[in-house]
Amino acid sequence: MSDNEAFDFVLDAWAVLAHFGHETGGVRVREVLRSAEKNERRIGISIINVGEVAYIIERERGVAKVHEALAALRSLPIIVLPADERVVLTAAHIKANHRLSYADAFAAATASLWDARLMTGDPELKALDGNEISVEWIGKE
């Protein structure tokens, strides 16, 4: 992945779980996924947020469901983006300056570095809209 590749959207764990859970915000996630299947959009997710999806599903539904979810995630038109030094240090900077989880800081850093809108319904990330990143809010108002 080169530094100058841009993405239209980066999904956080909240957005992926909304898609899997068929929640209200999942409708918008599915719209974007359909456009990515047609090569109209590029969608990414940080490997850290993939791990976040995995631990949430395992905690709530068990390890067998994690394997199903990861297989389903791999089948989607989403590119898993690495957490290299540049991403780690950007996430650390965001975490140092905002009240949010470290995993959320990776979602924000990934969106920022790949010039993408962050799709989320996580209230911690909504506050970043217009600062370091652009947020597409899919949560409840």
Image: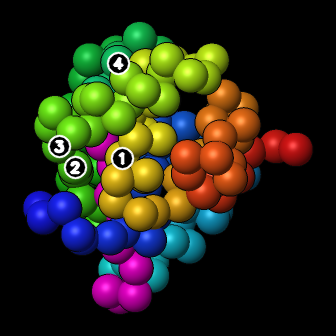
First in residue order: circle 3 vs circle 4: 4
Q: Residue at x 21, y 39 (%)?
A: 86
Q: Quadrant of the C terminus?
A: top right
Label drawn at residue 86: none
Taking the magenta stretch, the answer to whether it contains residue 19 is no
Label drawn at residue 110: 1
Q: Amino acid at mark 3?
A: Pro
Residue identifier under label 4: 55
Residue 105 coordinates in the image, percent (x, y)? 45, 30
Residue identifier under label 2: 81
Disc 1 versus disc 4: nearer the observer: 1
Q: Residue at x 36, y 68 (%)?
A: 7
Q: Residue at x 28, y 29 (%)?
A: 89
Disc 2/disc 1 C-alpha distance (Å): 8 Å
Q: Amino acid at mark 4?
A: Tyr
- Disc 4 is placed on an element classified as helix
Disc 1/disc 3 C-alpha distance (Å): 9 Å
First in residue order: circle 2 vs circle 1: 2
Disc 2 versus disc 4: nearer the observer: 2
Q: Are marks 3 and 2 in contact (CB under 8 Å)?
A: yes
Disc 3/disc 4 C-alpha distance (Å): 18 Å
Q: Is residue 82 left or right of residue 95?
A: left
Q: Are marks 1 and 3 in contact (CB under 8 Å)?
A: no
Label drawn at residue 82: 3
- Residue closest to the eye, 13 or 89: 89
Q: Is residue 50 visible?
A: no
* Span of residues in magenta: 38-50
- Residue closest to the eye, 91 or 11: 91
Q: Amino acid at mark 2?
A: Leu
Single out the residue that lies furthest toward the right.
141
